[in-house]
Amino acid sequence: MTMSKSNKFFVTGTDTEVGKTFISCALLEKAKAQGLTTGALKPVAAGCVEQDGILKNEDALALIDSMTLSLPYQSVNPVALKEAIAPHLAASHENKVLQTSRLTGFIQGAFMNRADLWLVEGAGGWFVPLNPRETLADIAIKLQLPVILVVAIRLGCINHALLTANAIRQAGLPIAGWVANCMDDNAECVQENIQSIYERIQAPLLGVVPKCENAQKASEYLSIEMLL
C-alpha cells in the first residue's frame, strides 16, 4: 500500500482532552498493521515530568510507542514544558518564547526521515496560542498539512466540531477526515450527534471509536484508506 497526495497530516481536536493522542496512536497502529512505516510528532507538550535527565510528556511517549520509526525523544517532542497549562503560559513561566518558524524547522527536520504516514499532533484545540501573534494552527498552515479532526462525542460537540471545521477551511487547509471519539460513557444522543456532524462537516468520517482499553483495539474501528 502506498500513500498518495499528502502522507503528512496535522491532528487537532475540538478542545483539550478529546482524545487526540489516543486517536493518533490508533491511526498509527492501523497503519502499522497494514505494513506501513509511520512517524509522529508532538512539537509542543505542556505537562512534562523529568525522566532520564530530560522533560518528557506522556502523550509524546505514547506516540513513540505506536509509531514504527525510531527517533530520539527530543525529535518527537522538541518543546517540553513543565506545567500542564496552555503552552504559551507554560512557556512564559519558564522564560521561553514559542515561535512557529522554530517549530516548523524542527518538524521539517524530522520529516527528513521517510515514512508512509506522518502525524503531527497539536495541543488542545485549533487556536491554542503560541505567542501574542501566532497559534498552533499556524504550524499546519505554514507546512500546508491536511488536517485530521478528533471530535469527542458529548454535549456541545456539534457546535465545537463545526466551528473548528470552519476555521480550518478558512485557513485554506483541507480536512482529510474526522473521527468520532465516543469516550464519554454518560453522553446522550451519541448516534444523533454523530449523524448531525456527518451531515454538515463535509469531510470523510474515518471511524466511530467506542471507549477502548488501548489504541490497538481502537484501531479496529478506524479506516485509513480515505487518507490515501
Image: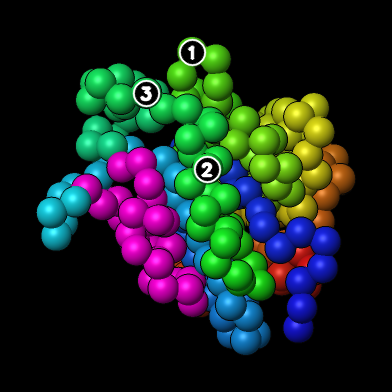
Q: Position of residue 87 (x, y in %)?
A: 38, 30
Q: CA distance from mark 1 to mark 3?
A: 10 Å
Q: CA distance from mark 3 to mark 2?
A: 15 Å
Give me the residue at 41% from left, 73% from top.
Answer: 70
Sooner in the amino-acid sequence: mark 1 or mark 2: 2
Q: Position of residue 10 (x, y in %)?
A: 62, 48
Tag shown at residue 105 = 2
Judging depth in this view, the residue of 155 and 208 nearest the camera is 208
Q: Say which element carries label 2.
A: helix
- Asked if residue 210 is positioned above or below residue 18 in the image, the reply reads below
Magenta-drawn stretch contains 170: no
- What type is the residue that disc 1 sits on? Pro
- Asked if residue 100 is positioned above or below residue 173 in the image, the reply reads above
Location of residue 207 (image quadrant): bottom right
Sooner in the amino-acid sequence: mark 3 or mark 2: 3
Give me the residue at 55% from left, 41% from top.
Answer: 104
Q: Which residues are magenta?
A: 55-80
Viewer-side label of 3, 2? 2
Mark 2 crowdedness (10 Å alpha carbons): few <14, some 14-19, many ≥20: few
Q: Say which element carries label 3.
A: loop
Give me the residue at 56% from left, 71% from top.
Answer: 38
Q: Position of residue 85 (x, y in %)?
A: 32, 29
Mark 3 crowdedness (10 Å alpha carbons): few <14, some 14-19, many ≥20: few
Q: Say which element carries label 1.
A: loop
- Asked if residue 34 is positioned above or below residue 168 in the image, the reply reads below
Tag shown at residue 67 = none
Judging depth in this view, the residue of 110 and 45 nearest the camera is 110
Tag shown at residue 97 = 3
151 to the left or right of 62: right
Q: Assess whether mark 2 and mark 1 are in contact (beta carbons under 8 angstroms).
A: no
Tag shown at residue 132 = 1
